[in-house]
Image (cartoon, coloured by chain):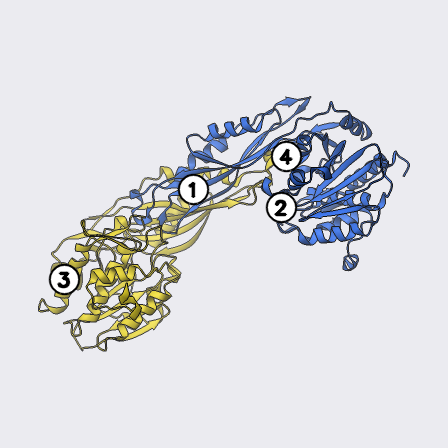
Chain colours: A yellow, B blue
Amino acid sequence: MASLAHGLDLTVDPVTLTRHLVDIESVSHDEGRIADAVEAALRTHPHLEVTRRGHTIVARTDLGRPERVVIAGHLDTVPVNDNLPSRLDEETGILHGCGTCDMKGGDAVLLHLAATLPEPVRDVTYVLYEAEEVEERYNGLKHLAEREPELLTADFAILMEPSNAGVEAGCQGTLRVEVTTTGERAHSARSWKGVNAIHAATDVLARLQAYEPRRPVIDGLEYHEGLNAVRIRGGVAGNVVPDECVVEVNYRFAPDRSTDEAVAFVTEFFAPYDVRLTDLAPGALPGLDRPAAAAFVEATGGQVAPKFGWTDVARFTSLGVPAVNYGPGDPLFAHKADEHVKISDIETCATTLRGWLTDGLA
Amino acid sequence: MASLAHGLDLTVDPVTLTRHLVDIESVSHDEGRIADAVEAALRTHPHLEVTRRGHTIVARTDLGRPERVVIAGHLDTVPVNDNLPSRLDEETGILHGCGTCDMKGGDAVLLHLAATLPEPVRDVTYVLYEAEEVEERYNGLKHLAEREPELLTADFAILMEPSNAGVEAGCQGTLRVEVTTTGERAHSARSWKGVNAIHAATDVLARLQAYEPRRPVIDGLEYHEGLNAVRIRGGVAGNVVPDECVVEVNYRFAPDRSTDEAVAFVTEFFAPYDVRLTDLAPGALPGLDRPAAAAFVEATGGQVAPKFGWTDVARFTSLGVPAVNYGPGDPLFAHKADEHVKISDIETCATTLRGWLTDGLA
């Protein structure tokens, strides 16, 4: 990776650039190194006005075009799962590794366009942000939207989350709660004198195991909810009957359900256990009736699928900016040990976006 | 606590000494400060030969008596549970606080006898040791038994574990296993593509909740087994379906069951889940037929109860030294937030042991 010794070169082909980005490990809360590299690289291109806030970077063209679009991607990944550095399988055309799919393939397309299109037909605001894979309150795009929303003003936004190089509309909401069971401590040698809070969690886990997801159809797109324990903890010492067990649950809800309705659902689902809300982000309805969304869908061929995962599309929607997901990679492989992306997806996205930003003249 | 500024005075009455010991916080693995204080105090009494190994202290008389007894107690406590410093309720005669019952009341009796009985009718080996409340491998008495068993040679041993100031014979064995359920990671937004290992633990917890303990009668004493989850952990990140959940289980087994039988029981109980043994200590049969044990029981009034908890009685038994539990405090309150000891228990034990060590002439 000799090229990296002299910094990141954004003008290399998007597949090579994806590898370079993947090989800079950037688990959430540890994005400093990749943000430094991306910022330095963007600043070598004088047609971009670069702004940095924390580990979030905004690069804008300012050509006075009648339309402005945001193209955005997050820089962080879930924890590495013995799947770095990247590995390219030349025969199958598949690039393996943490972040290949979610979402450094998309970041590479975005950065390559930023560097190599000095005069797009639409003004573009490129956004690379931190902390998307963790609790809502750390999200770099959220901070930007709250503190400097003018940096995100646009007629339309494309979020390059993995979507098999197709347009995905809307997104599901997400919330997290901690469900706590309680008991009474006792020496484990005389356990019948206490009440075991971990044993009491049987009922909480049994409800989760029996859960049947809703699958509502909205604007012709079928969504699919999910309710999962994502963490569990309990215990005092190796010889103490524990008096508390905490199950952290993540609920993904379809965009026909408001955040209030979602909170009410989990509260009732786990009643009478103590339920504490720790994270909440609304879904976004597909919004395919908006002109800017429809125009982009048209340019990409007209096919649209529902987005199951929560993405920052919801944040743009709440800012009044129509937005869709469109990026390389199959989201089924995001966050998995065998995370990977098809090279052809990266190339399709790069070609399609380049065509759209140049009216097919580039 | 002005007296402590000049070190621990072992000649104060055993109740005051209990308070002084309780107020030196000594959670397992953090016994340095209390061991330093105890060692320094013992060394001021020239009739004792003091040896220190780690945070374990041995003090011996060497009067050439025909009989030698060990009197032992551990210095560590379970984690503090908002119950320090000690609090004496003068009206009820109860001393509250972490370690009052398990087992600094016993330690105080032991240390008071060591300091104030320069010429007992039986030679005495006083042992104060570290790390009894945690995994077997850290146990200070175990280290001594393995490395310098000659320091523990005796005709009889008294372990001052809480026993309501009565003799408790035998002890239950203890083992710990980690029971692991596995699954497959996936992004929680598409959870139906993964397998949730925490949900899979429902079955493990349900078996624990349905468990019915054995209660065998041995030498006329009824034991009472227990099988408890003492810790649980699982989870990767707030948006990942977890692929592993680990339940740590503590099994307390009656002394008619060997360690091999106990391991076989839990392995079958949790089959087909992965079961990994992390800690194992045998029980001890009551052994009331041995002459030295019978003589001590006689001196204390003749009443005997079964010991549910595992204690180092089992270790003495395996060294060929008959041993019983005898100490102040109700073991039901060990390891609880409202841990406490009756002052009268401390006084009873001190008086009885003093009488036994002086043939009633002191």
Q: Which mark is residue A351?
A: 3
Q: Amino acid at mark 1?
A: Cys
Q: Which mark is residue B310?
A: 4
Same chain under badges 3 and 2? The reply is no
Kindly identify which chain the residue marked by label 2 belongs to: B
Q: Amino acid at mark 2?
A: Val
Q: Which mark is residue B78?
A: 2
Q: Find residue B46 and report its horizontal and vertical position in percent.
A: 84, 49
Which numbered mark, 2 or 4, is in the foreground of this view?
A: 4
Crowding at label 2, few (<14), some or many (≥20) Cα neighbours within 10 Å? Answer: many
Crowding at label 4, few (<14), some or many (≥20) Cα neighbours within 10 Å? Answer: many
Q: CA distance from mark 1 to mark 2?
A: 25 Å
The answer to whether residue B92 shows anywhere in this view is: no
Give the secondary structure at mark 1: strand
Query: Badge 1 is on which residue?
Result: B245
Toward the viewer: B212 or B90? B212
Kindly identify which chain the residue marked by label 4 belongs to: B
Q: CA distance from mark 1 to mark 4?
A: 28 Å
Same chain under badges 4 and 3? The reply is no
